[in-house]
Amino acid sequence: MRVVLAEDLYLLREGLIRLLEAHGFTIAAAVETGPELLDALLTHRPDVAVVDVRLPPTLTDEGLQAALQARREIPGLPVLVLSQHVQQLYARELLADGTGGVGYLLKDRVFNAEQFIDAVRRVAAGGTAMDPDVIAKLMQSTARRPGPLQRLSPREREVLELMAEGCSNSAIAARLVVSDGAVAKHIANIFTKLALVPADDANRRVLAVLAYLNGTVERAG
């Protein structure tokens, strides 16, 4: 699996390269500026991009802007943002096309290699991997928005939030101290209430998460 990595801090960039290579990834390019990132993404068209938000030359939002531009030119390009900051507006823009393949992790909340590598693989496969703090920021602007999401029970919202983090059914069951069967029932109810018609469950899962994070519903068909 080919990765384009963008990180301006030398030691962190080298550490991420070694970590990814140790888990079987190929580094197509490792860059440190926004313009270099955009060029690398369009040239190499990787299986996944791992991107810091703040890159030179201005250290504001070059990384995220480059990822958004590349994703517009390469629809569905998987992007995992790895940052110290939550950029709510741009995070929502990453989610807006409804195609999945999006993650947003906070650097100081990645506690082990397994957590990070699992997130990279999940995003590359078209899923989501969202830090709970990022989810909370996004939900601040959608919690009061009327629509199908308001039909969900508090427990169904909990389940959907954990789905957004990338938790499996068994992991959700463990976090909520319920059975796997109860989780499956909640997820089925979520699909029904969001009018996600029968299709591939993995696809409906991503669509449900995107609906939750965007405050909208994209129909599967």
Image (cartoon, grey):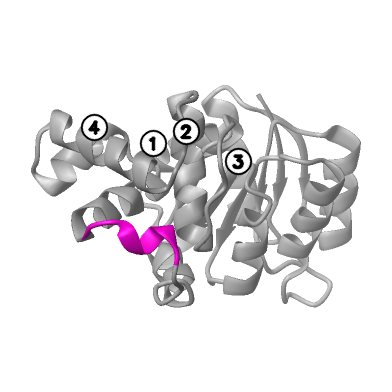
In the displayed structure, 21 sits above or below 94; it is above
Report the residue marked by disc 2: 197
| Front: mark 4 or 1 | 4
Categorize mark 2 by other alpha carbons within 10 Å: few (<14), some (14-19), many (20+). Answer: few
**Residue flagged by tag 3: what amino acid is it?**
Gly
* 36 relative position to 30: left or right: right
Question: Of label 3 and label 2, which has the lower sequence position?
Answer: 3
The reply to whether discs 2 and 4 touch (Cβ–Cβ < 8 Å) is no
Cα–Cα gap, marks 2 and 1: 34 Å
Nearer the N terminus, badge 3 or badge 1? 3
Please tell me how many numbered marks the rendered image carries. Answer: 4
Read off the residue under disc 1: 114
Q: Residues within 10 Å of mark 3 (few under 14, many from 20)?
A: many
Quarter of the image that includes the C terminus: top right
* Residue drawn 44% across the image and 56% down it: 212
Earlier along the polypeptide chain: callout 2 or callout 4?
Answer: 4
User: Distance between the Cα atoms at labels 3 and 1?
Assistant: 19 Å
Q: What mark, if any, has residue 184 been given in the picture? A: 4
Per the image, the residue denoted by label 3 is 101
> Circle 4 sits in a helix, a strand or a loop, which is it?
helix
Q: Nearer the viewer, mark 2 or mark 1?
A: 2
